Image (cartoon, grey):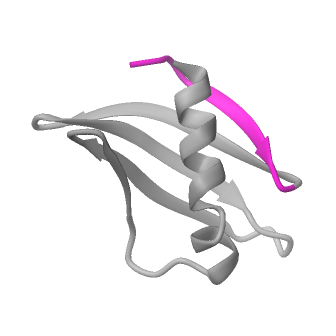
Amino acid sequence: MSNLFNSDIEGRQFNFQPIGVGHEEGYHVDVKDKDGTRWEFTMLRDNEEWKIEAEKLPEWLEASKAKLIEAVEQSS
């Protein structure tokens, strides 16, 4: 698993911090929206599938899932 990294996705700075949860690997991710609100969520990989775990995320974050996965895979 890679170290801490940042990625600019759709004009926003996403911060990725590696974590391990049981047999799953993933990242704690945080990003600020246009109003300055910080959103935090977890991306976990179980087998070969990435999933986002969070209470409730705004639509723009849900729509960015493919680009988030791409950023993580490129960092490896």
**In the image shown, does 55 or 37 lie closer to the viewer?**
55
Q: Residue at x 62, y 26 (%)?
A: 5
8 falls in the magenta region? yes
66 falls in the magenta region? no
In the shown orientation, is residue 52 left or right of residue 6? left
**x, y (%) of residue 18?**
41, 30
- In this rendering, is residue 12 above or below 18? below
In the shown orientation, is residue 70 left or right of residue 41? right
- When asked about the image quadrant of residue 4, the answer is top right
Q: Locate the N terminus and report the quarter of the image it occupies.
A: top left
Q: Which residues are magenta?
A: 1-10
Q: Residue at x 53, y 30 (%)?
A: 73
In the shown orientation, is residue 2 left or right of residue 48? right
**In the image shown, does 38 or 67 lie closer to the viewer?**
67
Residue at far left of view: 22
- In this rendering, is residue 20 above or below 53? above
